Amino acid sequence: MKLEKITSKPRRYDDACGTAHALDLVGERWALLVMRELMLGPRRFGDLKADLPGISANVLTQRLEGLEAAGVARRRKLPPPASVQVYELTDWGRESEPVILGLGRWGARSPLLDPKMPLSAVSMMLSLRAMFDPARAGDIDVTIAFRCGDGAYWATVRDGQLTGERGEARDADVTITGTPGSIVGSIYGFTDLAVLEREGAVTVEGDRQALAAFSAIFELPEKAAG
């Protein structure tokens, strides 16, 4: 079994540049991905670990402690009946969303990125935010429900804006069920929806025209020339 090396003391850049200091705070491996997974709200330790394949419990603990020490994240106990400990971003931590979305859009331009690799449900939702093109939205008014395993998510396009969170959708026009990768693949056109349905990778219930209209409002960036 391959063990991941744990750095006990974070290295610093000793540079007054804000970018350098940001890397002092969140530049350790896995830190930004932990922040990504917290972007839609509080998560339990086990849920974070499940959605970050490859991270060890020790490293996840260290990254969460580092984010807490930096003031980016905090832990708290949910009230009864849940009564479980969760981790969440602070208000300042949530301000990193445009940075994470921008980095994701920038990374999507890499010719080396394989869009068919697995991704988490939170990654799926943030990808939709990053690739949303308001100019294409027009007067579309549609709500999509996503079901990924035991998780429920929703996205609404209305008045030229995209909103979406974790949870059950109210009055969804269409529900699409599958893995996050299969769902995103069908929306972005990486894989034909009919093929995914025929293979049992996704199921669609509801207004298919609404799903088609929703899928048309996302624009993927061109690949970098290299």
Image: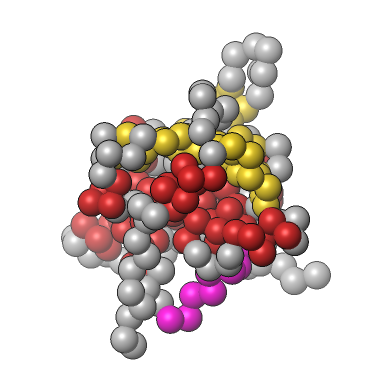
Name the magenta segment's main secondary structure.
loop
Q: Residue at x 55, y 58 (%)?
A: 186
The answer to whether any part of residue 1 appears in the image is: yes
Looking at this view, name the residue that lies furthest to the bottom. 226
Q: Is residue 98 above or below residue 27?
A: above
Residue nearer the viewer, 198 or 202: 198
Q: Nearer the viewer, residue 124 or 103?
A: 124
Q: Picture coordinates of residue 97 (x, y %)? A: 35, 46
x and y percentages locating residue 93 in the rendered image:
36, 40
Magenta span contains residue 117:
yes
Is residue 213 shown left or right of residue 168?
left
158 relative to 55 in the view: left or right: left
Using residue 51 as the reference point, say whether residue 124 is left or right of it.
left
Where does the magenta region start and end? 111-119
- Residue nearest the observer in this picture, 159 or 34: 159
Q: Is residue 56 left or right of residue 160?
A: right
Instruction: Identify the residue at horizontal 31%, vertical 58% (top origin).
Output: 102
